[in-house]
Image: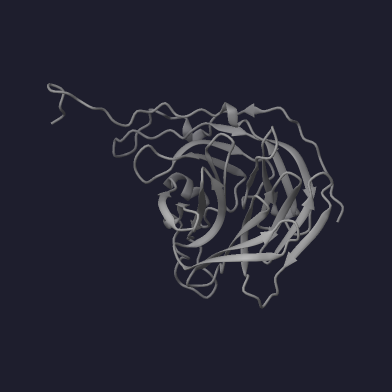
Amino acid sequence: MAASIAVGVLALSMVAPAQASQPAQARSAAGVAAVAEPPTFTAALARSYDTFDANQAVGVDKKYFYVVDNRKITKHDKATGKPLLQFVSDPDGPMIHMDSAVVVGDKLYATHSNYDQSPMESSIEVFDTKTMRHIDTYSFGIYRGSLTWLDRHDGAWWAGFANYDEVPDGETEPYGGTDNTQIVKMNDDFQVVESWNIPKTILDRFKPMSNSGGSWGPDGRLWLTGHDLGEAYVMKLPSAGAELQWVATVTLPSVEGQGIAWDRSDRTPELWAIKRSTSQALSFTVPFRSIGDPDTQTWQVFGPGQFQQ
């Protein structure tokens, strides 16, 4: 299918924080000060590509992008949008639900699960980007949830294991519970060495679904997306504790959730996403340099005469 390429406005703009972030002095019924949400920014559409199977996510490298749809991955030329190669798994084969893709070197790593079957099973499926042949696999078996995304950053692998408040057809219990969703850091052998939770406010936006996409940005922060909303949540590893720190929200016009991928191959990094309803792959210029770290101090050290009792 021929691709249509639309060049969007490249100006970057910042919008006012969402209404929920305004009442910094507001107090809850219990008298506890409410926590203000971080600022919201808006990305600008750079290009759009018509595809026929952009249903789950998109991966990208210097010359190509790869759209993911459960049992299929299609390689496209980035300059023209033309589809070049397609991997297709047999309907009766072991691949059921590929969720996202990341390119590292000359390999494409796709996250895979048996969503929405129970118990949850997950694996990483590896492809040669030149030939789109399947070349390797790593199984987690029954683990922390459904593996939805994978990325390589700072000498380690990072991934999201999603759980859901959704109740699958024929079942009576939620599919793991959204609040149990985890972000993990893994070594070169895909063994988990650390894990973090996503802030409850973001998880509530995901519900009844969960975290679908994740990619480390050029700003050294982790960008997360849900299943439905056109916004990315910019996260930072915490200085203490087990919960990621929410730094900012970036609105992605026309995006309907799902997997994302930062294109770090160019001098001007772009964030890629999909629009499921029209089966399009989209790239955005994002004002990541305008996003600052919160100026917060979460502890103090006291000397004699200052001790709290």
Task: Looking at the picture, tell me which residue is in the foreground, 57 or 267.
Answer: 267
Question: Seen from this angle, which residue lies furthest right?
Answer: 2
Q: How is the image coloured?
A: one colour
- Residue found farthest to the bottom: 92
Q: Is residue 176 left or right of residue 84?
A: left
Q: Position of residue 86 (x, y in %)?
A: 77, 62
The reply to whether residue 225 is visible in this rendering is: no
Q: Is residue 162 left or right of residue 279?
A: left
Total marks shown come to: 0
- Left or right placement of residue 63 versus residue 229 in this view: right
Quarter the N terminus occupies: bottom right
Left or right: 15 with respect to 278?
A: left
Q: Nearer the viewer, residue 23 or 141?
A: 141
Front in this rendered view, residue 26 or 302: 302
Provide residue 33's location: percent of width, then percent of height: 33, 33
Q: Position of residue 40 (x, y in %)?
A: 56, 33
Residue 64, how many percent across, how many down?
A: 75, 49
Which quadrant holds the C terminus?
top left
Q: Is residue 178 visible?
A: yes
Residue at horizontal 69 percent and vertical 75 percent from the top: 91
Residue at left offset 60%, top offset 48%: 229
- Vertical arrangement, residue 82 with respect to residue 29, above or below: below
Work out whether 52 lies above or below 169. above
Q: Is residue 295 above or below residue 108?
A: above
Q: Is residue 251 above or below residue 280?
A: above
